[in-house]
Amino acid sequence: MIQKIAVIGAGTMGHAIAGCFALYGYPVSLYERFEEVRRTCKEKIKKQYQFLHEEGVLEASKINEALDRIITYAELKPAVVDADYVIEAVPERLDLKQELFANLIEFCSADTIIASNTSSIAFSDLTAKMEAKDKARTMVCHWYNPAHLIPLVELSFFGNMPEETYQEVEALYRSIEKRPAKVLKDIPGLLANRIQQGVAREVFSLMQMGAADPKDIDTALKYGPAFRYATTGQLEVADFGGIDIWCTVGDNLLAVMDRTAEASPLLREKVKEGKLGFKTGEGFFAYPEDQKQEIQNEFNKRLLQQLQVSRKY
């Protein structure tokens, strides 16, 4: 049974992953090699907890209790030596992750389950240098950002591990109210990112052809397809709409829709202009510096409201 958690990397995803486990009673060891990131990560987790409290979904007394369950480490070995489950959230570099996994195999017990949060590095590449016995306790557990609000976790089941090991990890995630999706093929992007990129490609294409203003394109998505997708999957939508209808509409539309195999030129132009979105103050929309916190909070409130609704389904 998984009881002790170790998280490797306290950056954007790592600190939030640690915060999720701690909130549900798990002791968490959080390793971060960079002192500044390590020093500030618990304050970032605290702010996420405080947001949940302000929105009425977390009791104030739970905040410090959860924070006390997180211990930060500057050295890898003491952080993982007694862990039952380890998940890494370090930068997406194959050499870095392979080196890390080699160290984890050396430092952890033979029963420790070792996971990667990657969605862009093939599992076969990640484990290429491992022995079969070590591959049998290794998997991908991909979280979505922001980790404390998005319930999806994609869990790999690629034939390398026993079913009972997979079930143990799935039970772990259900215990913290995540929604696991079991991925059977080692494919780039896993499930959700591929689906998301398919939608995004057509959205960017509509922008490029001048079909509508950015706000109206987002309105069409939010209050049309995404409105259903919030509680209904695409395959269920097809069943309710009629598979014959979907077949006909597909024949009519797919031939005239975007089929490019690379990122939209519109995105490249934005990157060239330094308009990278929220973090730079402008992307497709403007984010004035004096309003950024308010905009971020409003964005997170929408996700939180959707999270609360999704728990009913």
Image (cartoon, rainbow, N blue to C red):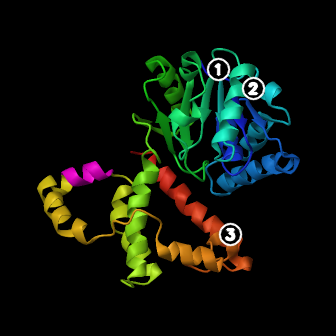
The secondary structure type at the circle numbered 2 is helix
> Which quarter shows the C terminus?
top left
| Image quarter of residue 205 | bottom left
| Res 80 label | 2
Question: Residue at coordinates 46% horizontally, 52% vertically from top-left?
Answer: 193
Give coordinates of residue 90: x percent, y percent. 69, 43
Kindly identify the amino acid type of the residue bearing the numbered disc 3.
Answer: Lys
Magenta stretch bounds: 233-239
For the residue carrying disc 3, how many other residues have a C-alpha within 10 Å: few (<14), some (14-19), or many (20+)? few
Vertical arrangement, residue 91 with respect to residue 183, above or below:
below
Q: Is residue 201 visible?
A: yes
CB-based contact (under 8 Å), mark 1 and mark 2: yes
Please indicate whether residue 147 sits to the left or right of residue 201 in the image: right
Give coordinates of residue 52: x percent, y percent. 65, 52
| Res 112 label | 1
| Res 205 label | none
> Disc 3 marks which residue?
279
Please indicate whether residue 141 sits to the left or right of residue 4 in the image: left
Vertical arrangement, residue 298 with respect to residue 306, above or below:
below
Give coordinates of residue 182: x percent, y percent. 42, 35
N-terminal of the two: label 1 or label 2? 2
N-terminal of the two: label 1 or label 3? 1
Q: How many marks?
A: 3
Magenta stretch encompasses residue 61:
no
